[in-house]
Image (cartoon, rainbow, N blue to C red):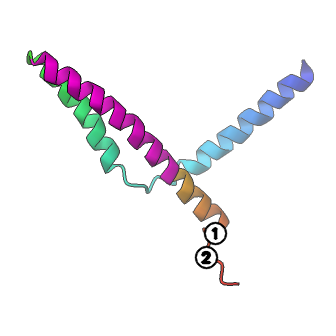
Amino acid sequence: MNRRFRWWVSVSACLLVVALLVGPATAADKKPLNDATEQVAEGGRSIGYGEIGSGVGDIVVGVGRTVVESIVYTGKTIGEFFKKTFGGGDSTS
């Protein structure tokens, strides 16, 4: 039990450090992600106005776009972190 507890503490500490280091590296473009999120909100407003068919369609497409754009944004953010941390492939040797 003691060894397992130490393992969880060390993994948690490493994840916390990575999260804190990735946090400031948020220079990636959020506009596509915000646009996809806005499409979900627009679908919700359409349902509120009684346009059920188009509202549900907007929500479904918006959720799909939000998932895809979130993955793209996360990948770009992690890529920027590694470029800033490890030098980013500007080898002149």
The answer to which quarter of the image holds residue 46 is top left
Q: Residue at x 8, y 15 (%)?
A: 50
Magenta-span inclusion, residue 70: yes
Where does the image place residue 15, in percent across and percent down from the top left? 68, 39
Q: Quadrant of the C terminus?
A: bottom right
Read off the residue under disc 1: 87
Query: Residue type at mark 1?
Result: Gly
Q: Residue at x 43, y 40 (%)?
A: 70
Read off the residue under disc 2: 90
Q: Residue at x 22, y 28 (%)?
A: 58
**Residue bounds of the magenta highlight:** 51-76
Magenta-span inclusion, residue 11: no
How would you rate the neighbour count of disc 1 (Cα within 10 Å): few for under 14, some for 14-19, many for 20 or more?
few
Where does the image place residue 55, in percent across and percent down from the top left? 17, 23
Q: Residue at x 26, y 26 (%)?
A: 59
Query: Residue type at mark 2?
Result: Asp
Q: Is residue 60 above or below residue 19?
A: above
Under circle 2, the secondary element is loop
Where does the image place residue 73, in percent across and percent down from the top left? 44, 47
From the image, give the main secondary structure of the stretch colored magenta.
helix
Front-lying residue, 53 or 15: 53
**Residue 61 falls left or right of residue 21:** left
Front-lying residue, 3 or 70: 70
How would you rate the neighbour count of disc 2 (Cα within 10 Å): few for under 14, some for 14-19, many for 20 or more?
few
Do the residues bearing badges 2 and 1 touch, measured as CB atoms within 8 Å? yes
Count of picture labels: 2
Where does the image place residue 8, in percent across and percent down from the top left? 78, 28
